[in-house]
Image (spheres, rainbow, N blue to C red):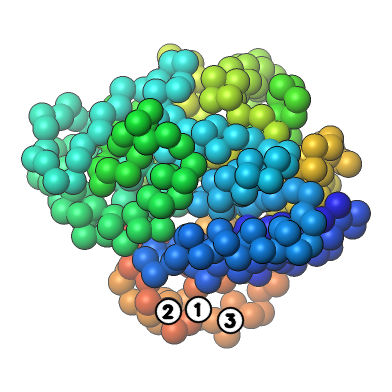
Amino acid sequence: MDILVICPDSYDRWAFERVAGHRYHFVDAGISHWEASPDFDLLAYLERCREVMRAEHIDAVVSTHDLGDLIAAVLAKEAGLPGPSPEAVFLCLHKFYGRRADVDPVRCEAVRLDEALPALTYPAYMKAPWLKLGLLGFKLESDDEARAAMELARRELPAWTRQYYPLFAAAVDLAKYPLATTDMMLVEEFVEGRQVTVEGWSLNGQVQIWAMTDTNTFPGSRVIDNFSTPSRVDAQTASMLTAKTVETIRAFGFDGGFFNIELWLTDDGVRLTEVNGRSAACFGGIYELALGADIFAAVADVACGLAPRAVPRTGGRVAGQFNVITFEDDLAGNLLDYEAAKLVPEFSAFRRADERVRPVSEFGVVLGQIEMAGDS
C-alpha cells in the first residue's frame, strides 16, 4: 500500500524505506523535534500533504512524532482512511484533557500563564500540557521554584504554541475543549515510582501489547540514564500494567494505530504518567536488538488496518539505550568530542556540533544515545 509519512526525520526515512511490502511518501515539515519552530505554517503543510495524497492515491497516513501524530489523524479522517480519531490522538497529546479522560487520574490543575500563581501543595510537578522530552517540566518544592518555572514557561512556551494551536483548532471542537488553545502549565501531584513504558496497538477494538520497557534513572536522581527492554517487572506486575493499559486506551477511545503509555509503579498500584498516540519508535533499535522485531514494519501494517507481520519474541537478550546528557548552555561541539564519537558505532549524536543547546527542564539536554545489547 501507499503510505504517507508525516513530519519525517532522517531515521524515519531510513527505517521505513527498508520495510518491504509498502511504498512510502515523505513530506518534510522543516521543523525540529528538539526545538520550537515558530515559523512553521501548519495550514500550508496540511495542503502540501493533501496534494501528495491526491497525486499518489495514499492508503494510510502515519507519524512517529508528537504534532505529526495529530496531523496524520486529521488527514486520515478527511480522506476516510484507517487510523485513530483526531479527538483520541488529541487526548493523548494534551495532558490536561488526557488526565480528565483517565479512569483514575492523578490530581491536576491548569495554571494560565497570564494569571497569578494559585496556592499550591508541595511537592508538585509542573509541566507544559503537550510538550515532549520533559521540556519545561520541573519538580517543585516551594513557591519560589514555582514562580521561576512559570517565568521560564512565559518565555519559552509561546514559541511552541504557534505550531500547535492551529492544529488543535482543526482537530477538535474548541467548545468542548476550551483550554486547548490557552497558554498554560499543568501542576500535578508529585508521584514517586518506577516508570515503565508499555507499547502496543489497538485494531478493531482489540488492544495488543508489543513490549514493555523500563525507564532507569541515575542513582539518587530523576534524570534518565537509560531505557532497557524487556522490562524486569515480574509476571504479576506485567499483568497489572497490561490491565491499566487496556483500560486507559479504551477510555481515550483510541483505535486504529500504535500507542505507547508511560506508567508509574507506586506503593498504591499502577498510575498513569501519560499516553502518546503513536509508536515509541525511538526504541526501534533496542526492540530489534533484544526482541528481534521491526517496530516500523508493524506501524506501517497497523496503519493500513492489518495485524503486524511480525511481533517481538523473547530470547534472553536485553538491550539498553543510554543517554549522553548535558546541563550546560553551550555549543554542542564544546560539550561532546565528535571525532571520538565517530569511533563508537553504537553512538548516535542528536545535535550538530555547531548547534547551541540549553536545558529548559530538570532533565537536561540529550546530546546523543548509545545502544547495546547483552545476555543480562
Which of these two is toward me, 74 or 298? 74
Please give the name of the residue rendered at 58% of the width and 45% of the height, measured from the top-left corner: 74
Which of these two is toward me, 326 or 359? 359
Q: How crowded is mark 3: few (under 14 residues within 10 Å), some or many (20 or more)?
A: few
Please tell me how many numbered marks the rendered image carries.
3
Please give the name of the residue rendered at 31% of the width and 62% of the height, measured from the top-left corner: 159
Whether tag 2 and tag 1 are in contact, CB under 8 A, the answer is yes
Q: What residue type is labelled 1?
A: Arg
Which label number is shown at residue 352?
1
- Disc 2 designates what residue? 355
Please give the name of the residue rendered at 51% of the width and 52% of the height, measured from the top-left corner: 67
Foreground tag (1 vs 3): 1
- For label 2, the SS is loop
CA–CA distance between discs 3 and 2?
18 Å
Which of these two is toward me, 135 or 68? 68
Whole-percent x, y for residue 64 in the image: 62, 52
CA–CA distance between discs 2 and 1?
5 Å
